[in-house]
Amino acid sequence: MNKLFFIAPSIALLAGCTAIQVSPVSSSVKMHNVCIQENPKVQVADLIQVLEAGFARHGIGTQVFKGQEPANCEFTLNYVAFRAWDMVPYMRDANFIIKQNDKVIATADYHLKAGGGLALTKYASTKDKLDPVIDQLLASVSNPSDNGPLRGTQSAAAPATPAAPVAPAYAPAMPTSVPSVTPAAPAPKAAVFTNMVLSAQKLSTQMGCGDVRSTGGTTFQARCSADYAAIIDCAGGTCRLARGAKN
């Protein structure tokens, strides 16, 4: 009985950390293809891939574009997504808007309350987080498998074969293209290390670089471009740019 008493609150904590709000596409809307406007500020690498697979699952073809919207796009999807950091980066929020000829016809929001808190599900893959959102968004859309062609472009892609299940990435690896640095000192205590990470990440963001990762002791590394990484040193409680490194 005592075990059940302590386990129940934990289950409630995990179940209550995710909020999903969806205003779905109406069943009266005939959507065979949608144009996805790429958002270069979003750093969730596989987001578009997950969107394409999700729309294909509902018999909807996709066309990704940058900048000016093509003239043949009747339906357009715009999105934003944000990451949080707790030892490793993970997707915290995502918002989607579908327009038909510039008129909003559907919206969807994914949000981790309190950044996911202590729930390990916050480290789940982009697919595991967004597939339920996409399915709710397109629940009323029913198309035959032989979709017609997108006006002025190639025929819409057939639904993609579902990928094999992927276990939640509880400790995803950071990019391997950034050179490692030999640890200069033993790892600091947890509380001190956490504050150090936050300071290093703040400096990295100010420099226009990505997420930081520890390289041992008080040093961190952040990828700033395809061929450049910043080495940040937080010795003495103050983070500063130590040097740059080529990828």
Image (cartoon, helix red, strand yellow):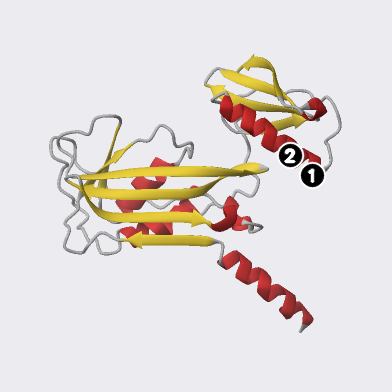
Rendered position, 59 above or below 204 = below
Q: Residue at x 25, y 51 (%)?
A: 60
Amino acid type at image mark 2:
Asn
Label 1 near label 2: C-beta < 8 Å?
A: yes
Q: Can I make out residue 160 in this image? A: no
Rendered position, 214 above or below 36 = above
Q: Which residue is mark 1?
A: 191
Position of residue 93 measured from the top left corner of the image (x, y, whole percent)? 48, 49
Instruction: Assign a secondary structure to mark 2.
Output: helix
Q: Which residue is mark 2?
A: 195
- From the viewer's perspective, tell me whether residue 95 is left or right of residue 43: left
Residue 10 picture quarter = bottom right
Position of residue 91 measured from the top left corner of the image (x, y, whole percent)? 52, 46
Q: Residue at x 49, y 55 (%)?
A: 111
Position of residue 247 measured from the top left corner of the image (x, y, whole percent)? 60, 18
Amino acid type at image mark 1:
Ala
Rendered position, 76 above or below 153 = below
Q: Can I make out residue 45 in this image? A: yes
Q: Residues within 10 Å of mark 2 (few under 14, many from 20)?
A: few
Question: In the image, which disc is placed on residue 215?
Answer: none
Q: Residues within 10 Å of mark 1 (few under 14, many from 20)?
A: few
Q: Residue at x 63, y 56 (%)?
A: 117
- From the viewer's perspective, tell me whether residue 233 is left or right of residue 37: right
